[in-house]
Image: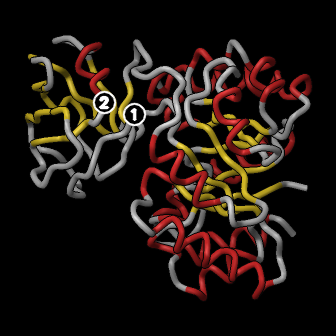
Amino acid sequence: MFKTVLTCGPACASDLLLKKMAQVADGFRLNVAHLVGDKLSEWMTRLQELRQQTGRDFSIVLDLQGAKVRIGSYPAVTELPARVELFLGESSSRSERIPVPAASVFAQTSPGDELFLNDRKVVLRVVSKGSDYLQAEVAKNGALSSGKGINSPDRVFELARITEGDLRAIRCSKDFANVAYAVSFVADGHESSLFRPLVADARLIAKIEQRQAMLNLKCIAEQFDELWLCRGDLGAEAGLKELGHLQSLFVAAIPALQRPALIAGEVLGSMVANAFPSRAEVVQLYDAMQSGFSGLVLSDETACGAQVAAVIEFLEYWLK
């Protein structure tokens, strides 16, 4: 059985779309980084009610931040000014000032370094720095909004950790059944020792999104219940030219891992805007099924895309 995990967001907030999604979803993903205040609890309550309405016991997957660094609250823009400032802080209302609530980014970054934001859709080149700010030129422009990830091609900014947001999400989920937890930026598998005591026997998922993890897949599989190959951050760190090679290494390792392995990251990326997948995506999906992947994870396609209904229709057709 090929599993489907669909991400919730503003694009699929209507009851009608959620009911349609429930007919093909084995799991609904909630990105904790984007759900502040009472929003996480509201979404989980809606999904619990959806289970009762549809009679389907799909899982609720909480995507925890772990070691992943994200920007703070920031106005959604389609492109950035030519020059920006990153500063140590939680929020900004100005597009030229990007808040980064992680001191490690400023300590570990130097003039001349590049930073990748939003899965490398935005590339910044640092020109000067202070203890709590970075001045940067925009080398590649693109869209940016609150909670998007920030990567470096040379380093991981944070060691394995449990954020306050992760703790709140885990506490919030305790009253709900069939909840799984996905840990971002797993490096070697020891991260499970941080999260396992908090989630007991719930399913613990390792997100493979840095090169270091590719060297430790066996150890990670021994400590986690499921692995996701997350090509967004992996491609941002390793570079697009290396991404195909890394996926081939992951595929070669699947039989020995003896764990479900799901593919994520623009699996049907063209359907964010288009009503039909590209031929390349259809062929890639077939190859994924044949090469040992146990399922797929969709993100923007259902969370913020313009063609959610079309995505559901395609999955219904494909999974028959």
The quarter holding residue 41 reads: bottom right
Which of disc 1 and disc 2 is earlier in sequence? 1
Q: Quadrant of the C terminus?
A: bottom right
Left or right: where 30 falls relative to 49: left
Closer-to-camera residue (278/224): 224
Whether residue 26 is situated above or below residue 196 in the rendered picture: below
Instruction: Name the residue rendered at 61%, 78% in the picture.
Output: 46
Judging from the image, the colouring scheme is secondary structure
Measured as percent of width and height from the top left, residue 256 is found at 91, 22
Three-letter amino acid code of the residue under disc 2: Ala
Closer-to-camera residue (306/175): 175
The quarter holding residue 261 reads: top right
Circle 2 or circle 1, nearest the eye: 2
Instruction: Name the residue rendered at 20%, 57% in the picture.
Output: 75
Q: Quadrant of the N terminus?
A: bottom right
Q: Of helix, strand and loop, which one carries label 2?
A: loop
Residue picked out by circle 2: 102
Whether residue 303 is situated above or below residue 92 in the rendered picture: below
**Tags 2 and 1 in contact by the CB under 8 Å rule?**
yes
Residue picked out by circle 1: 69
Q: Of helix, strand and loop, which one carries label 1?
A: loop
Whether residue 187 is situated above or below residue 162 in the rendered picture: above
Left or right: where 77 falls relative to 45: left
Left or right: where 84 falls relative to 269: left
Closer-to-camera residue (176/242): 176
Measured as percent of width and height from the top left, residue 236 is found at 44, 29
Closer-to-camera residue (15/92): 92
Label 2 and label 1: CA atoms lie apart by 7 Å
Q: Residues within 10 Å of mark 2 (few under 14, many from 20)?
A: some
Left or right: where 124 falls relative to 284: left
Instruction: Name the residue rendered at 19%, 32% in the picture.
Output: 88
Three-letter amino acid code of the residue under disc 1: Val
